[in-house]
Amino acid sequence: MGNSFQIKWVFIVFFSLVAQIFILRDVALANVAFCFIYLWIIIKAPIHTPLFYLIIGGFFIGWIVDIFYNTHGIHSLATVFIAFLRPTFFKVLTPVNGYDERSSVSLSEMKALWFFPYIFVMLLSHHLILFLVESADASLFMYSLLRAFASAILGTLVFGMLELFNQKN
């Protein structure tokens, strides 16, 4: 990995955490759909990132959000969960020819038929864990499912827009 890639990656991590903690903390659509931009870090990690790094990174990213949200580890749990499942999602969504060593998780390289299902499944998995554990009550099960699906759709739209701005021409 080049030095410019590492600098860009540090900027992405810092920007997404600052945006999540200070800007998006209290933003919700109809108190149902929430945007968790910090997941961009795990979603956009290079394809061949070792699982150990994904899980450790997911834990610390979730832990930082938990500290500012006062959620006692729920974000860490959900983020580690999607970091753990990420290689499985790649195996399920692998193209016929496999991934190139230089492949990155991007709309321009992977195309919409791969990119959007990947993002939606990652976000839905995270949000299901997050909202179901957060509610911890069977009477709120349907409301938690609604929040998870609405947040996954919103997140997919937001991440799609971010990817359009991030495309290399």
Image (cartoon, rainbow, N blue to C red):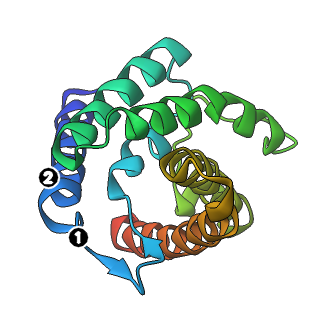
Q: CA distance from mark 2 to mark 1?
A: 13 Å
Q: Quadrant of the C terminus?
A: bottom left
In the image, residue 107 lies at what x, y percent? 55, 62
Callout 2 crowding tier (Cα within 10 Å): few <14, some 14–19, many ≥20: some
x and y percent of residue 36 in the render?
38, 59
Please tell me whether residue 102 is drawn above or below residue 168 in the rendered image.
above
Q: Is residue 51 visible?
A: yes
Determine which quarter of the picture holds residue 150: bottom right
Height in image: 25 above or below 118? below
Circle 2: element type:
helix
Secondary structure beneath dot 1 equals loop
Q: Which is closer to the viewer, label 2 or label 1? A: 1
Q: Which residue is painted at 48% across and 68% down in the image?
A: 155
Let me know if residue 1 appears in the view. Answer: no
Above or below residue 109? Residue 100 is above
The one nearer the camera, 120 or 107, is 120
Out of 86 and 5, give the one closest to the viewer: 86
In this view, the residue farthest toward the top is: 52
Compared to 50, does 111 lie above or below?
A: below
Left or right: residue 127 compared with residue 168:
right
Q: Which residue is mark 1?
A: 26
Name the residue carrying label 2: 18
Specify the label residue 158 is tagged with: none
Q: Residue at x 44, y 39 (%)?
A: 42
Please state which amino acid type lies under the numbered disc 1.
Answer: Asp
The residue lying at 37 percent from left, 43 percent from top is 41
Question: Amino acid type of disc 2?
Answer: Val
Residues at circles 2 and 1 in contact by the CB criterion of under 8 Å:
no
Residue 114, percent across and down?
Answer: 71, 58
